[in-house]
Image (cartoon, rainbow, N blue to C red):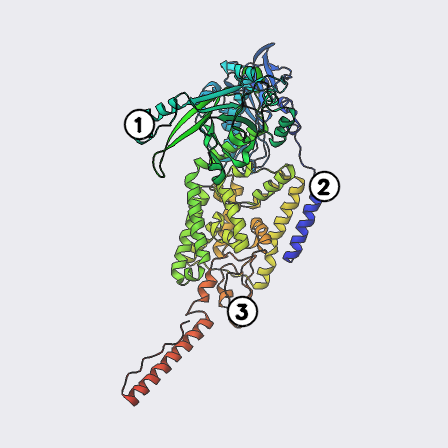
Amino acid sequence: MSVRLLICLLMCLSFAASLLVEPRVTVAASGQPELPRFLTTLKASDLMPGATGFGQLRDDIPVAPILKNGETLGWAFLTSDFVGTTGYSGKPIHVVAAITPDAVLAGVRLVEHSEPIVLIGIPDVKVQRLTEGYAGLDLKAEAAAGGSAHDLDIISGATVTIMVIDDSLVRGGLKVARALGLGGLAPEISGPQRVIDVSVERLEDWTTLEGDGSIRSLTLDVGQINAAFAASGDERAAARPEKGPETDSFISMKAALISVPSIGRSLMGDAEYNNLTTWLKEGEHAIMVAGRGRYSFKGSGYVRGGIFDRIQLIQGDNSVRFFDKQHRRLGTIAAAGAPSFTELDLFKIPADSGFDPAEPWRLQLLAQRAVGPIDKSFLTFDLAYRLPESYLVPLTPVSLDTPDEEAAAKAALWQRIWRDRQFEIAGLAAMLIVLTAVFFFQFQATRNERSLFWFRMGFLTVTLVFLGWYANAQLSVVNLMALAGALQTGFTWDAFLLDPMIFILWFSLAAALVFWGRGVYCGWLCPFGALQELTNRIARAFKVPQWELPWGLHERLWPIKYMIFLGLFGVSLASIPLAETYAEVEPFKTAIILKFAREWPFVLFAVGLLVVGLFIERFYCRYLCPLGAALAIPARMRMFDWLKRYRECGNPCKTCANECPVQAIHPTGEINPNECVNCLHCQVLYQSGQKCPVVIKKLKRHAKMVARNKESAAALEKAFGARVPLKEGTHV
């Protein structure tokens, strides 16, 4: 079956899936709580000892009271009704928990999940037992410690799943406790507690606006600015005082939050205010700054550099500098009784600045004085501003996450996982850098056969021990099924970022497919592939005979892995959990993730493949691996052919074909990129002066040329009695 035919078949299957398979939409996705669906499968006593039943689901919060003879002992809730619980499978992990009036988890049950490792790799009872161990968790302590008051217990091979369960129980439990006011926990208000009351549109005159604080002022006279520079300790600035009467105005600066409807319309008029609202985008605000006196709050720096360097808005830890694109001039002030100003300008506050109009802020003025030809001395003065309470309205407390907050919580979870695995990430990054260097400089790396052999054995050992058994970074066709499921139900990056090692490996593999094909992973970074090759090398050391299948049979066994992959892909269109079960044809979980600690049939299967691999190197990789088949299809799109060949390869020379460890070289000399594991042995032979006939021929020709040159030089020396320098032949 040709590769093109396989690609066409996959495209047809994908199209059929889009027509026949409806994306799974859970009840929670439609905004309805899913807790009632699971309460029918649980007994109240499973969650709280002595309980006799569940009450009706509350209308305001999706929790159900846990009753004992009509008395409420606590409340049951489903974590996925309150927080995101998407696991590695891309589907929610549903956990029901009971919470007491004292904000303590009384009981916990894992009721539904689709995690592939847990489904077919780790006994479900083991994860159930760990989940139930959260009974007794004090949410008051978690609230005080930011969710880190307890020790996180991890099951090897199910790290992501357990961390998602842990995160959902803590965050979901805290939301329920705050919403119900349990244990003294108050509802958590997200965002600003007060917002601008847009319904207030009264028009006021200048005197009223100044009187109620809508307009705030900063006034400095000449005497005050001179005294300030004198007190600054800069003798040069003190020696250059501002001239004129001390009562003369140095600057009189006014500021107002003009994006507030009532203030804006009062100061600008309806037409200008409408222009302002058109200028401002959602979340943006604007201030009006007016000034008169000797000193300009704008200066001239903005003309040259586009930034107003004499003023900045400061609120808490945030500051806003204004640029020319955030600036507009205002012609006149519409409010009755307004004085005249020499400078009248509007400045836009960006939406991403973190500015809260309900909180106090200050406009800082930078006053400068020349103390030399190019030197200046600087002082700052603050104009404090607080929007009057009459323009504000309180917000109703909200206890449930907004989509942005939920996304931030999910991001915090995967970022926490990445921080916890910094050592593994650094190790993988080092391996990828070294391997990339080897492939980019493969001509130099393959000059010495012995050096390359021991480097490869060492690298494969690191791949097996560190990448596989320690970090559990074994890619699987299950990952591809999880991706297919995510594409059907709504793709997000969160689930895939939960395992940094797997994510980095897939990302680097995608790049490697473009440059070198699938062999970079299969031949160097696959832990089970490394286990097969290392055990085969040990077998060779003990003189275990090696079987080489006839080319005709070998070529006909190749399609088996493609058939397995297509079969799993077809099953996944109907049922991803069923396909994940059939994906047990991969021995990766048994041999790498669980380190053979499984039921005997799985262990027997994995060991059987390794035993066959003692006689036929990489037997599983060659004929059975569905992941290798899946990677071989896009690998056909690689952009470069890095493996060098001679015209004589295959006809007449068959050295590379005979010595290829996985028989990926056709007898006619072509390398099959779908089967090649990029071990680089053929590149060693390409430069070998002992095995490659082409190189041997070149060396012989070179030796003859040198010999002829020596004979000619000797004849000339004998004839003329002078030594003639030799001209060496061209090096191979």
The front one of 58 and 719 is 719
> Identity of the amino acid at label 1?
Gly
Q: Is residue 286 above or below residue 669?
A: above
On the question of residue 493 being in view, the answer is yes
Task: Give the residue at mark 1.
Answer: 233
Residue bearing mark 3: 650
Q: Which amino acid type corresponds to the residue marked 3 in the rendered image?
A: Gly
Label 1 element class: loop
Residue at 41 percent of width and 20 percent of height: 247
Compared with residue 731, is residue 331 higher up or lower down, i.e. above or below? above
Query: Helix, strand, or loop for circle 3?
Result: loop
Q: Where, quadrant-wise, is the N terminus in this rendering? A: bottom right
**Label whose residue precedes the other's in the sequence (3 or 2):** 2
At label 2, which amino acid type do we have?
Leu
Foreground: disc 3 or disc 1: 1
Residue 48 screen position, x and y as percent: 54, 17
Alpha-carbon distance for marks 3 and 2? Answer: 48 Å
x, y percent for residue 602: 53, 42
Q: Which is nearer the eye, 567 or 389? A: 389
Is residue 100 in sight in this rendering?
no
Place residue 272 in its image quadrant.
top right
Mark 1 Cα-neighbour bin, 10 Å: few <14, some 14–19, many ≥20: few
Label 2: how many Cα within 10 Å (few below 14, some 14–19, many 20+): few
Task: Identify residue for label 2.
Answer: 20
Q: Report, in whole angstroms, how far the alpha carbon at label 3 lies from the one at label 1.
A: 88 Å
Residue 696: name its quadrant: bottom left
Mark sitting earlier along the chain (2/1): 2
Between marks 2 and 1 in the image, the one whose residue lies nearer the viewer: 1
